[in-house]
Amino acid sequence: MNLPTPLALVLLLSGVWSLVVWPPFLRRVLRDPRSRDDNGKGTRFLKVHIMLVSTSMILGAATAVIGVRALVA
């Protein structure tokens, strides 16, 4: 992959940022009272946020990998 080093670094930092920021957010969502109903079942609030966090982390990991590959190549 032929990318200028500054752009590769932006991709790498962006990916690392996503992987660092989203797990604490998910922990806060899991502790939020809106995450569970009275029976302890996960609510739509929880499901939407789990999908948001997982999608963001997958894209963050992919972005970081692209940045690393661009730096190495």
Image: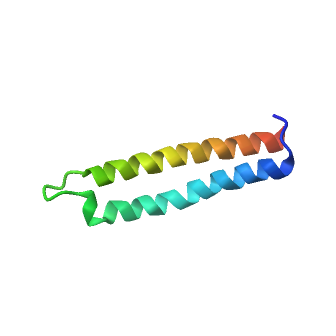
- Residue 41 in the image: x percent, y percent? 20, 51
The residue drawn where x is 60% and y is 48% is: 60
Classify residue 71 by image quadrant.
top right
Q: How is the image coloured?
A: rainbow
Classify residue 16 by image quadrant.
bottom right
Q: Residue furthest top?
A: 1
Residue 16 or residue 3, whichever sits in front: 3
Q: Quadrant of the N terminus?
A: top right
Horizontal arrangement in the rendering, residue 27 relative to residue 3 (left or right)? left
- Residue 20 in the image: x percent, y percent? 57, 59
- Residue 49 in the image: x percent, y percent? 39, 52
The residue drawn where x is 36% and y is 49% is: 48
Horizontal arrangement in the rendering, residue 45 relative to residue 8 (left or right)? left
- Residue 18 in the image: x percent, y percent? 58, 54
Q: Quadrant of the C terminus?
A: top right
Horizontal arrangement in the rendering, residue 72 relative to residue 24 (left or right)? right
- Label count reads 0
The residue drawn where x is 42% and y is 58% is: 26
The residue drawn where x is 48% and y is 58% is: 23
